[in-house]
Image: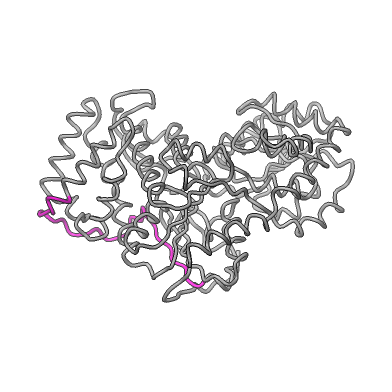
Amino acid sequence: MPATVKIPTAASADVALLLEGTYPFVRGGVSAWVHHLIQGFPEIRFAAVFLGSEPSAYKGIRYELPPNLVHLEAHYLYDRSRAKPRAETRVDLHAFADMRAMHEGFALPGGCPAHLLAANADHLLAGRLGEGQFQGSREAWDMITAYYRDRTPDASFLDYFWTIRSMHDPVWSLARIARALIPARCYHSVSTGYAGFLGALLSQAHKRPFVLTEHGLYTKERKIDLLQSAWIEGGGGTPDGTPGGTTGSGAPGGGTLGAEGPEGSYIRRLWIRFFEALGKSAYAAADPVISLYEGIRQQQIQDGAAADRAISIPNGIRLERFLALRSRQAIPPRPIFTLIGRVVPIKDIKTFLRAMRSVRARVPGAEGWIVGPGDEDPAYFAECQALAEALGLSDTVRFLGFRNVDEVLPQTAVLVLSSISEALPLTLLEGFAAGVPAVSTDVGSCRQLIQGKEDDPDDKAIGAAGRVVGIGDPSALAEAIAGLYQNQEEWSLARAAALTRVERYYTERRMLDRYAEIYGKALA
């Protein structure tokens, strides 16, 4: 982390990046991607709008800010210290009718229609739907109590009431941010969710182009978090206090469950539909909607993105940075098996730990390195440490915290990814560029990265750069790690395939050339 960082400010920018729970306050794959994107276009003046939960969740700026990042502002959507507006008893009846129609649309099979989302966004920007009105008017109270009686007869009213309040709080904040942000010629969000909704608001307000890039499927990841989160079992609250789908640690609540269904309680389903609505509003406003690979693109279209605006641009890395690392790798390598990633539930660190117990029994001297920050979800990090100790892995598994991959990759025999959800992980590409084959769960584009794209015979002909296993299967993961390492011929062929594939298909230059076309059109 830089010792001292001067926060840049400017009167205008070319591209305003809308960043939820990532750069520059959090390290990780998406943050690194944003950092390289800014550096890749030194002629473009970027602004960055960071959206976080509350100030105490972040430990300052974690990157050396590039000189062409001319403006940075941070906003905290669940900041409890923020002064609440004065309650208002009078409302704009037309705006309120549109808001009521939007809420009723959440219950429709296809979700809320896009035109209702756009109409309410217009009301928010114009101030016709204010936080004070929502919290103090008779109309709002009547709507909330009517919905409670009709939809959640078995739930605690207090749980339902505070869920609705918590759900709407960030919306008012996003409207204020949109009204106050410096002028920009183009807006670019790297997720849907709150950042994507902000992009839709800004594009609608200023009639400027809005570009959306999804590294994963935000709505899917939020759904995973919501289905796993214990706080909903207690009733109301907020999803986890960390916008961006990055944890799933939970927030306190109290009370009883609502009506049950395929996705659990009514309150759980309400949160899921809320994030689906945010995603739909971003898809409706963005052009283009960018995914990292075809599988995500197809899901985006299914979720509401227009097919003619949905495109795929794979991640890319700077090969030059990793060329020197290849010569530092011992062949055959020591049995060091490395997982690079945040210690959070979606990375399923516990499956890696259980696999390492079996790997140690098969591979003498085996070590498991977990390289990534543990402060994002302290409770989960503590659980992982306790599990490692309970499994007798204190002398086998090392929690190294954040490290430069240049230190780690030359010592790694196999890069391991045990996640339950991914998109196109940069860690695999970086490992490939350094000559490290991989074992990964079958998530996101990991199968095509390791085995080649099914619709590309030339890519398939390169061969396998490692092995792919199912999600949450420690035995299969252990077998793949140990088997790949102990079969030196397979390991060598996988190393060669990894190098060839990343050099042919996943360079940063290829990626930046595509974004140059998009920015050129948006800024014209």
Quarter of image, res 65 = bottom right
Q: Say above or below: 42 vs 114.
A: below
Left or right relative to 99: residue 178? right
- Horizontal and vertical percent for residue 22? 51, 54
Left or right relative to 249: residue 200? left
Q: Which of the two residues, 118 or 162, is positioned nearer the viewer here?
A: 118
Q: Residue at x 62, y 64 (%)?
A: 40
Q: Which residues are magenta?
A: 70-95
- Horizontal and vertical percent for residue 204? 33, 58
- Horizontal and vertical percent for residue 468? 69, 31
Say if the magenta span includes residue 88.
Answer: yes
Q: Residue at x 47, y 42 (%)?
A: 307
Left or right relative to 317: residue 382? left
- Horizontal and vertical percent for residue 113? 30, 40
Q: Which of the two residues, 459 or 447, is positioned nearer the viewer here?
A: 459
Quadrant of the image for the N terminus?
A: bottom right
- Specify the principal SS of the magenta part: loop
Left or right relative to 248: residue 504? right
Q: Residue at x 19, y 34 (%)?
A: 147
- As drawn, the residue found furthest toward the bottom would be 11
Say if the magenta span includes residue 250.
Answer: no
